[in-house]
Image (cartoon, helix red, strand yellow):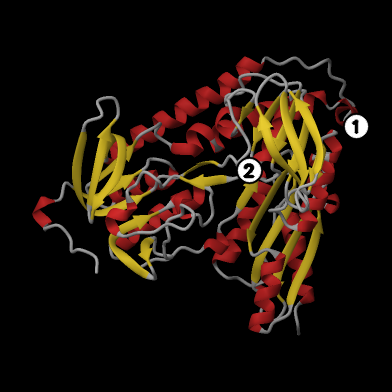
Amino acid sequence: MHPGPVSDGSFDFDVLVIGAGYGGFDAAKHGCEHGLKVAIVESRDMGGTCVNRGCVPSKALLAASGRVRELADRQHLAQFGIHAGPVRFERQKIADHANQLVATIRANLTKTLERAGATILRGEGRLAGPQQVVVRESGSGLERTYRAKEVIIATGSEPFVPPGIETDGRTVFTSDEAVNLEWLPRWLAIIGSGYIGLEFADVYTALGCEVTVIEALDRVLPTFDPDIAKIAARHLLDGRDIDARAGVLAQTITPGCPVTIELVEMKTREPVETLEVDAVLVATGRVPSSSSLNLGAVGVETNRGFIPVNDRMQVLVGDEPVPHLWAVGDVTGKMMLAHTAAAQGAVAIDNILGHGRQIDYRSIPAATFTHPEISSVGLSEADAKELAARDGFELGVVRSYFKANSKALAELESDGLMKLLFNKGTGEVLGAHIYGLHAADLIQEIGNAVARRQSVRQLVNEVHTHPTLSEVVEVAYKQAALALAS
């Protein structure tokens, strides 16, 4: 049995949110907009990982380094009849662009919360019991207990550094430090070929660094659709002279000048070689920030640090919701993306307001902002095959190519593929995977179709602007409609 709520008259807030990343921000803003008295606790910078150490600064670096790549690609420019001089860039000014963007967005986010009427509490929050949160104030260290009708945990995640790897923040570092672009190592090893490793490989190679990518799993880009991974690796790794190795584990990494990396076979743990490089970026995923929350005070047990929740964002003990306790964002481990966290934050508030609402993870897209981009939404092909076998339908798979698209050809950027997954009986769109120019924008259209559980029978009649990249999607819908069972 969970203890009952504190008596109504003694609440300081209707909702108290722990963590001001995107999940906490959207929960607090949504709550204020619907008349709730909201407080939000943050121990570090407002905006969390995304604004300060993730999506925002990395996109600034990708934008600047992408321009350098375009201007330096003489062969590509020559096809347009353009001849550019040698490219010069200032590393510090590129870094300043990222820092200024972070400062602007952080300030905007803080002002938005203040204007909405949220109380911002600077400090570290932890649970003291049901509907009670202790905040240790930043600076003074003073502690104060607040009572809230509802508590939302939104403490996010931090980079995962595997055992055997020692970081010093300069020669061996994570994405937290990489976004500062403090220096450009001549030879950089990147551990991991997920979206973080790929994006930084894009930045560093554009700025003239030699890059080696080390992937412990048996293929590079292991989190991506295999067909998409194949074409993307050909362009984003092989096409850039990146030495990419799969099935190899960095067993130990020792900072210094040079940094030493002991590589072993992943399966056998047999030594492969010792590399000496200028720097190492550890991009091996992220782990939840939950250890200091005192979850035991309300009887909650984590799963490898992740807080179990249902699709209403209620925290669970066993399969039962803990009254008045919610969790959103990376700390739930569902889809560790900023926009997922924001969506979860709004879902939690809607349920607090009594509007029963569940989140639909299948319709949330994901994107990797390389040049060109990779994106996906819905089911993987493996999961779609399982669903087809379980529910007794035939899975449809069609491919649409950028080389048949007028806009991609006009841009001389026709290296791309879209794969669409659908139910051959009903035509329902189950997912899509794209590699190509502006894939991150193109995926939204399919995400909307998945959200509405639409069939290609309806979608095939939607007219797309010509000439645009969106016709890649239209072609896929038309192929799928032709493949439906009559």
Nearest the eye: 175 or 119: 175
The answer to whether 20 is drawn above or below residue 320 in the figure is above
Image quadrant where one finds the N terminus? bottom left
Q: What crowding class fits label 1: few (fewer than 14 Cα within 10 Å), some (14-19), or many (20 or more)?
A: few
Residue at 85 percent across and 50 percent down: it is: 403
Residue 380 location in percent, x, y?
68, 63
Residue 451 location in percent, x, y?
55, 65
Discs 2/1, front: 2
Nearest the eye: 433 or 163: 163
Residue at 57 percent across and 24 percent down: it is: 180
Horizontal side, residue 104 vs residue 31: left or right:
right
Q: Secondary structure at mark 1?
A: helix
Q: Secondary structure at mark 2?
A: loop
Image quadrant where one finds the C terminus? bottom right
Camera sees residue 210:
no
Nearest the eye: 27 or 400: 27
Q: What crowding class fits label 2: few (fewer than 14 Cα within 10 Å), some (14-19), or many (20 or more)?
A: many
Q: Quadrant of residue 149?
A: bottom left
In this view, the residue farthest toward the left is: 9
Disc 2 or 1, which lies upstream in sequence? 1
How far apart are the alpha carbons under marks 2 and 1?
Answer: 38 Å
Residue at 63 percent across and 38 percent down: it is: 164
Specify the amino acid type for callout 1: Gln
Q: Which residue is mark 2?
A: 284
Specify the amino acid type for callout 2: Thr
Nearest the eye: 425 or 89: 89
Residue at 76 percent across and 63 percent down: it is: 476
Residue 222 location in percent, x, y?
72, 52
Q: Quadrant of residue 260?
A: top right
Q: Which residue is mark 1?
A: 79
